[in-house]
Amino acid sequence: MAVYETVIGLEIHVELNTKSKIFCSCSTAFGAEPNVNTCPVCIGLPGVLPVLNEEVVHLAVKAGNALGCEINLINKMDRKNYFYPDLPKAYQISQFDLPICTGGFVEVTAQGEKTRVNLTRIHIEEDAGKLIHLEDEAYTLVDYNRGGVPLIEIVTEPDIRSAEEAVAFLKQLRSILVYSGISDCRMEQGSMRADVNISLRKAGTSVLNTKVEIKNMNSIKEVYKAIKKEESRQLQLYSYGEGHKVVQETRRWDQAKGRTLAMRSKEDAHDYRYFPEPDLPPVRIDREWVLQIRSSLPELPVDRKKRMMAAYGLRETDVDILIEEKMIADFFEATVALSREPRESANWIITEVLRVMKNQEKVPLTPEQLSDLILEVKKGTVSRTAAKEVFEALINQEKSTGALIEGMGLNQISSAQTLEAVIEEVIEEFPQALSDYRAGRTQSFGFLMGQCMKATKGKGNPGIVKAILERKLKE
């Protein structure tokens, strides 16, 4: 049987961080009551005229700069015609042959291999509304709040060769856009959605075979699953021979059933009957403005990674985790600035903070609280085990770390004089264990150590207890 390789290209729709829509002043706020954020312009009533939001152009140029694109100083808007209930005027204002950005790339690492995913273009367009399909009902509801929300569509070349590369690309792209303030990229809210174009071909050939598009994926984890399943489906079709060919079509991912399902035949560009938008003039951009936007870009993930590795001496894998989310990287650096303990800060954030954040959208404690906890452990005020109890108590609380340690009665006993008195009492209480140890049965040391910790109700500093016990047993 022939060996096949996967060829993937992505189209990513990203909602821009603007307060108002692309062609009107309606709010872009997420979560409003259905059809509240609408007006005659964004629901396409006859006779209305669009006015392009300048901030949309600014953010699109910013994205192009962040992704290494060429900014086209003259570009234009086009009408993309199609009939669908979530598009009330039956056309979408988008860009066709003169997009705002061309070229660009994103460097990714997947399965230990570094590769570059080249971009074809970035163009700006308006979002459509949202259809709500009710189970067991004969009708569909539509919410036009999202209609007219500004988007950039980022189109890659077919450079991706695996589900792992696709995931790495999406994570890296998301980080760049969030770091730059271009979008919040909350996939669960639909502000970043990916269309996956996937085909298979015989390994070693350069032909591009018939592709299938998997539409509107709003989870990176589900993108991975969908690619794996579609790879398997297409491979099975090719294994049947010429009578079973892959059909060019748009499919959707059924998350519950773990499979892709056919939606409709895939359109080509001519099906949309593009023509220049007659109600909007060409977009003319000043070169100096492009340079100003480029110079205003913040530190991007790849640069932050290099700096953090050099500054803090952390492992690359740890830094990759810390910089994936900007707020986590910011939290880490704020914690280190206070504690001066980069390794401990990284360990607490990776193991504890991120664990808690699986169910929260923000960091559940302050850098001051975490840095104080790290320093209290270092000073011996609280044991590492007890510190985890304190951490749990700190979540979403405004109390100081010291106050919680005191209030919970978890202060560690580090006084050598106090601990020595306790240890002497334990040795006196268990003379047989002392005899066993001196007779060479060293396992009795563990028993005595446990009794000492029990006598201090777990508050004894283990290192100090161990050192004093060893000295006492040799006397």
Image: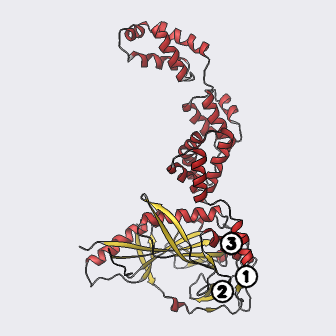
Q: How is the structure coloured here?
A: secondary structure
452 displayed left or right of 276:
left
The residue tagged 2 is 77
- Please state which amino acid type lies under the numbered disc 2: Met
Residue at the far left in the pictured view: 1
Residue 91: image x %, image y %?
61, 88
For the point 53% across and 62% down, the residue is 171
- Tell me, for residue 59, which label it has, or none: 3
30 vs 428, nearest the viewer = 428
Q: Quadrant of residue 26?
A: bottom right
CB within 8 Å, label 1 to label 2 = yes
Q: Quadrant of residue 163?
A: bottom left
Q: Quadrant of residue 417?
A: top right
Disc nearer the start of the sequence (1/2) = 1
CB within 8 Å, label 1 to label 3 = no
So how many labels did they put on this image?
3
Task: Give the crowd class for mark 1: few <14, some 14-19, many >=20 residues within 10 Å.
Answer: some
Task: Give the crowd class for mark 2: few <14, some 14-19, many >=20 residues within 10 Å.
Answer: many
The residue tagged 1 is 52
- Please state which amino acid type lies under the numbered disc 1: Leu
Secondary element type, mark 1: loop
Spatial separation of the CA atoms under disc 1 and disc 3: 13 Å
Spatial separation of the CA atoms under disc 2 and disc 3: 16 Å
- Please state which amino acid type lies under the numbered disc 3: Leu
Disc nearer the start of the sequence (1/3) = 1
